[in-house]
Image (cartoon, helix red, strand yellow):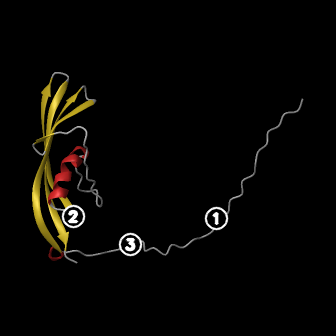
Amino acid sequence: MFMSSCIGTYNTKSSRTASFYPNLVWYELTSDDMELLGEMEISISYRRYLGIFRVFDKINGEDVNRRVINTVSLYGDKNVPLSPILKRALYEVHIQYPDADFLIPVFETEQKETMFLGRRVEKRAKIRAYKLLV
């Protein structure tokens, strides 16, 4: 009895390619090129049980509608991180300053209250809205 398997052959060929996109684009921005539209403090409070379940209580001081979830994502430099939970509260800044080109978090605070098998958490952040003048 003779057994064999069929193996295909793979031919690869590499060639050099050139990208016509620049490797680096440098645009120098100064404070004269931006206008401060305003700043706003955002907040979110929630309860966390067993480290798994999260129940939102208030977003920006208002009761949470659990059926409607509005979020805003920040793109660009990741050196200024914003907690993913605060993305729901950031939506109010976008509504108040719709012409803003930049939403920059200034600081973020977190207050935790430990409970039995859970905790209450309140997060706050200060956000500044800027518009480009160029």
Label 3 CA crowd tier, 10 Å (few <14, some 14–19, many 20+)? few
Query: Which three-letter amino acid code belongs to the residue tagged 2?
Result: Phe
> Could you say where residue 2 lies in the image, as x and y percent from the top left?
88, 33
Q: Quadrant of residue 13?
A: bottom right
Which of the image's four quarters has the C terminus? Answer: bottom left
> Could you say where residue 100 lies in the image, as x and y percent from the top left?
19, 65
Label 2, label 3: how many angstroms apart (C-alpha)? 22 Å
Q: Is residue 59 left or right of residue 74?
A: left
Name the residue at the right extreme. 1
Residue at 84% in and 33% down = 3
Which of the image's four quarters has the N terminus? Answer: top right
Q: Is residue 76 left or right of residue 90?
A: right
Label 3, label 1: how many angstroms apart (C-alpha)? 26 Å
The secondary structure type at the circle numbered 1 is loop
Residue at 14% in and 58% down = 96
Q: Is residue 108 above or below residue 129?
A: above
The secondary structure type at the circle numbered 3 is loop
Looking at the picture, tell me which residue is in the foreground, 45 or 116.
45
Residue identified by numbered label 3: 24
Q: Is residue 47 above or below residue 129?
A: above
Looking at the picture, tell me which residue is in the foreground, 64 or 124.
64
> Could you say where residue 97 lies in the image, as x and y percent from the top left?
16, 61
* Of marks 2 and 3, the one in the foreground: 2
Which comes sooner in the sequence, label 1 or label 2?
A: 1
Q: Quadrant of residue 130?
A: bottom left
Residue identified by numbered label 2: 102
Residue identified by numbered label 1: 14
Query: Which three-letter amino acid code belongs to the residue tagged 1?
Result: Ser
Label 2 CA crowd tier, 10 Å (few <14, some 14–19, many 20+)? some
Residue at 28% in and 29% down = 52
Label 1 CA crowd tier, 10 Å (few <14, some 14–19, many 20+)? few
